[in-house]
Image (tube, helix red, strand yellow):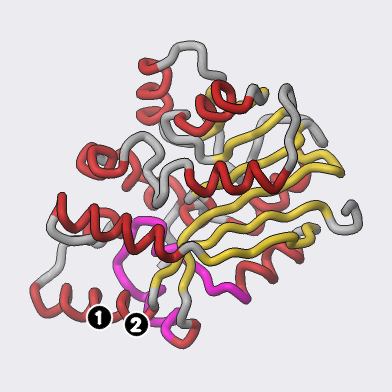
């Protein structure tokens, strides 16, 4: 299955999803954003790019709470418009992570929170992150990953359209980040945030089917899909990296 990033990302446009998750549309809200900021030592006025910014909630948080010069990009017209309606002053623009409209070495930090997994070409996106980041900059990624590598092939055969469709294993992610010119400084598992998020979503929606972006299916097929997802053991991680050789 090769879903494009727009198709995968449509899950974030769904009103029933955002009603449960809030504007951040990810496990933990700003918890991992704040955790990363405590580790990266950005200074007020530093330039930060949020890739896959959605409605701009993180951009607004970075500006208001940390006095950072934050900018957001997202491919979704709908989400960007929602953000502009909430705050017309937010610096948001429409662009995919694989083709960023910025010059080389512009940003002190690049954030991709629950967005790398919905990009069509994650490797190309990482190359773009590397290009637009300063040599002393920091990359922050938080996302879903597959904690059981043995089930990854079965996962990729499922008719999913959300972040789980693009989930990778920890070794795959680390290799992809390193091969893009980065050096990983921190990897933390925060799967408890995903579990809490799942419980909240199930309480509100009855299941995680909507968030995972599962296509309509018969009862037997749905049961098998849920079994496979359970075997994959979806987790959630935080990764901080710098350009190799710059630490």
Q: Which numbered circle lies on residue 231?
A: 2
Range shown magenta: 151-171
Q: Does the magenta stretch include residue 163?
A: yes
Residue 85 position in % (x across, y down): 36, 15
Q: In this view, does 28 lie to the left or right of 20?
A: right
Extreme-bottom residue of the structure? 150
Residue 46 position in % (x across, y down): 74, 28
Q: In which quarter of the image is the N terminus?
A: bottom left
Q: In which quarter of the image is the C terminus?
A: bottom right
Q: Residue drawn 76% across and 65% down?
A: 179
Residue 16 position in % (x across, y down): 20, 42
Residue of label 1 = 227
CB of mark 1 within 8 Å of CB of mark 2?
yes
Extreme-right residue of the structure? 245
Q: Is mark 1 on a helix, strand or loop?
A: helix
Most foreground residue, 42 or 57 = 42
Mark 2 crowd level (few <14, some 14–19, many ≥20, 10 Å Cα): some
Extreme-left residue of the structure? 219
Q: Is mark 2 on a helix, strand or loop?
A: helix
Mark 1 crowd level (few <14, some 14–19, many ≥20, 10 Å Cα): few
175 to 30, vertically: above or below: below
Give residue 180's quadrant in the image: bottom right
- As measured in the structure, the alpha-carbon distance from the residue carrying label 1 to the one carrying label 2 is 6 Å
Residue 57 position in % (x across, y down): 45, 30
Q: Is residue 155 magenta?
A: yes
Most foreground residue, 28 or 149 = 28
Q: Residue drawn 32% across and 63% down?
A: 160
């Amino acid at each position: 299955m090769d879903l494009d990033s727009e198709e995968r990302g449509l899950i974030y446009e769904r009103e029933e999803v955002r009603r449960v998750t809030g504007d951040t549309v990810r496990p933990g809200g700003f918890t991992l954003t704040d955790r990363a900021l405590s580790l990266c030592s950005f200074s007020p006025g530093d330039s930060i790019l949020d890739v896959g910014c959605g409605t701009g909630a993180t951009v607004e948080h970075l500006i208001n709470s940390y006095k950072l010069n934050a900018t957001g990009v997202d491919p979704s017209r709908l989400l960007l418009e929602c953000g502009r309606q909430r705050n017309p002053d937010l610096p948001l623009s429409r662009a995919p992570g694989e083709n960023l409209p910025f010059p080389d070495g512009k940003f002190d930090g690049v954030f991709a929170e629950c967005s790398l997994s919905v990009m069509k070409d994650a490797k190309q996106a990482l190359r773009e992150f590397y290009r637009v980041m300063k040599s002393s900059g920091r990359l922050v990624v938080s996302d879903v990953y597959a904690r059981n590598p043995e089930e990854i092939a079965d996962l990729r055969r499922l008719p999913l359209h959300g972040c789980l469709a693009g989930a990778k294993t920890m070794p795959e992610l680390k290799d992809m980040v390193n091969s893009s010119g980065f050096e990983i400084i921190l990897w933390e598992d925060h799967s408890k945030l995903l579990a809490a998020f799942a419980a909240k979503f199930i309480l509100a929606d009855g299941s995680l089917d909507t968030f995972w972006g599962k296509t309509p299916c018969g009862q037997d097929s749905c049961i098998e899909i849920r079994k496979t997802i359970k075997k994959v053991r979806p987790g959630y991680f935080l990764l901080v990296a710098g350009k190799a050789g710059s630490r």
